[in-house]
Amino acid sequence: MPLFSQYLRRFYVALAELTWGAILAIAIAHFLASWLLLELAGESDFVSRPVDFVYYYIVTATTVGYGDLSPQTGAGRLVSAFIVLPGAIAIFTAVLGKLLSAVSNSWRGRMKGLGNFNDRADHDVVMGWREGATQRLLSLIVEERRSGEAPTVLIAKELEQNPLPDKIDYVRVERLADPAGLERAGAANARSIIVRGSSDDETLAAALVASATCERAHVVAYFDFDTSAEILMRQNPRIECVTSLSSELMVRAARDPGSSVVASLLLSAGKEDTAFSLKVPETVAPFAYDGALAALRRHHAVTLVGMARHGNVDLNCKEKTEIRSGDVLYYIADQRLDPGRIVWDAFAKDSA
């Protein structure tokens, strides 16, 4: 008896919440009851043919009413009018409402940061929210995103819903340094992770967790104080730390007028003459720096300004400095170069 009571209680809860299981059970029960009543009413003309009855039941449920199949006896018409028609329509409406509700809940969940994007790859992840500054950051990333690239995922804890639903996706977390949030954002396969918490302490913790759990992604962390950046670089040199350059720019602009304009052009992807980087593929033979300088200018109309090896940047290379696979080239161009369209063979020729 207690077992029967327990099953009855579960059925009542499922019926009250109108779960898919309850809808399926009601639909099967109503279908079989309709078939049995029409059979008893003498409607053997189409009831005896399962395909025809299924067709009649669905047409009735969707209120299409083609009229090619219909009860012929009085009893059959009464069964259809008072049993089949209202029940089938009610079940169809419940299914439709359930589907619409599921789609709506899914969309609202994504808007509120409850979505899961762990299958995403080669995208950018932004951790932290600062009104104005993060919005500007996201807008710049969206401007630079190429056609076909996956949308950026924002991880934050202060937002009720996605601030830019037409441009990015959003994952809401209780704390920024949360591995589960990074997993939902697909950070393990991300191209880069940008961290800017509400304080340097939060940024430090979030950047360390991101670097430890997402070894494939390049982690960039912004700090308000140089000391915080130095601490993180000692803990993990692989993380690129950024601090405000406003004081340096002011001094440089005072001594060399126009320097701030140059810096703005080099850093803004929304303008021409932007600084980009390019990693030399593994299959490319070594070449001299002056050969790359000439080839990039001649074949791609861009200006080479420096290179980096193992994180050490040199913006004033000697002409015969050897560039090898894995090195990074920095260049100024109106738009980013496609590595697959670069004439790498010309680099070695122009080096000769």
Image (cartoon, rainbow, N blue to C red):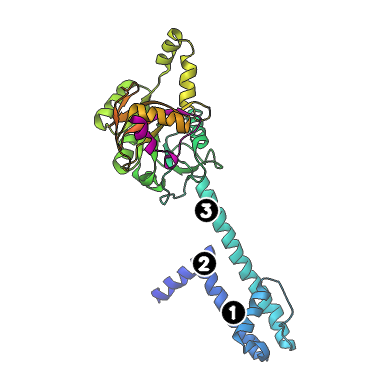
Please provide percent x and percent y for residue 352: 33, 30
Give the residue at x 41% y 31%.
Answer: 295
Q: Amino acid at mark 3?
A: Ser
For the question of whether residue 201 can be seen, the reply is no
The reply, left or right, for residue 8 in relation to residue 60 is left
Q: Is residue 190 above or below residue 261?
A: below
Label located before the other in sequence (2 or 1): 2
Q: Nearer the viewer, mark 3 or mark 1?
A: 3
Give, as a single range, the part of the protein colored magenta.
Answer: 330-352
Residue 76: mark in rendering:
none
Give the residue at x 69% y 82%.
Answer: 79
- Read off the residue under disc 2: 20
Tell me the quarter of the picture where residue 206 sits. top left
Q: Amino acid at mark 1?
A: Phe
Please provide percent x and percent y for residue 345: 37, 38
The reply, left or right, for residue 48 in relation to residue 328 is right
Q: Amino acid at mark 2?
A: Trp
- Read off the residue under disc 3: 106
Residue 31: mark in rendering:
1
